[in-house]
Amino acid sequence: MFKSLFKRNKPETDKYAGTPNVMGLKLGGSFELDALALRLVMADMVVSKVAATQIIQSAGIVDLDGTTLYRFYTDDEGFLQVVANGSGEEDVVDVKMFHYYDTLDIANQAEWEQLLNNKIGASSYQLEGHTYQRVWTSTTEYHNPVHMEEKTYQDNTDFSTTDQFTMLFERELDNGEMESLFLSAEEVVNNNALERCLVISTGMTVSPTQITIHG
């Protein structure tokens, strides 16, 4: 009886320990985007509405041979992408806020090969009457998609792995800012079946003064 009365409670474990984090961004946290900065660019962007407050619901990480790409997926159908050349905040080289535009199912192998070999790496891409120019350069007219393997975490015991074949484009807005277009041809094994789709996202670069991070 006395043993049960004086038994110490076990400390609660952090279910997010070991999941992707950088700049204070982490699972279970949130961040705010500068409302004025959003208003200045929203009129010219494809995305029609962006919430100032974003709650992080899952987090992904990609290792690109010395460069680490973090993605923090939010409740606003978007993700904050952070590119870093090291583990410190001073190693962050780029931050972009993307929102999903569309997800297109890939019906068969022929359509998948056409997408990877002829479409996604073209020098330009058209979306809603706008022309976006490819950012990643190549010695040839066509640039093969850049492969990324992303691990995406809901917590430190639940993660999924997705193969992505990607390309980045951008266009200049009327105010001189750039709008990014990110194409990702994705495949994942789900219940022993291979699923493929093309994810189209648009976004903008976020400066340190335009974001407030909450733990």
Image (cartoon, helix red, strand yellow):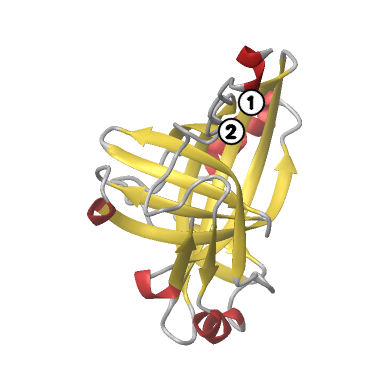
Residue picked out by circle 2: 155
Is 205 located above or below residue 18 in the figure? below
Q: Residues within 10 Å of mark 1 (few under 14, many from 20)?
A: some
Residue picked out by circle 1: 188
Residue at image position (46%, 68%) is 212
SS under mark 2: strand
Is 39 located above or below residue 138 in the figure? below
Is 61 located above or below residue 53 in the figure? above
Q: CA distance from mark 2 to mark 1?
A: 19 Å
Regarding residue 179, the answer to whether it shows in the image is: yes
Residue 75, given in percent of the width and then of the height, sits at 68, 55
Residue 100, given in percent of the width and then of the height, sits at 65, 56
Residue at image position (49%, 55%) is 215
Kindly identify the amino acid type of the residue bearing the numbered disc 2: Asp
The quadrant in which residue 161 appears is top right
The quadrant in which residue 112 appears is top right
Q: Residues within 10 Å of mark 2 (few under 14, many from 20)?
A: some
The quadrant in which residue 93 appears is bottom left
Q: Is residue 8 left or right of residue 141?
A: right
SS under mark 1: strand
Kindly identify the amino acid type of the residue bearing the numbered disc 1: Val
Q: Is residue 193 left or right of residue 175?
A: right
Task: Give the number of the disc on residue 92.
Answer: none
Residue situated in front as seen by the camera: 76 or 135:
76
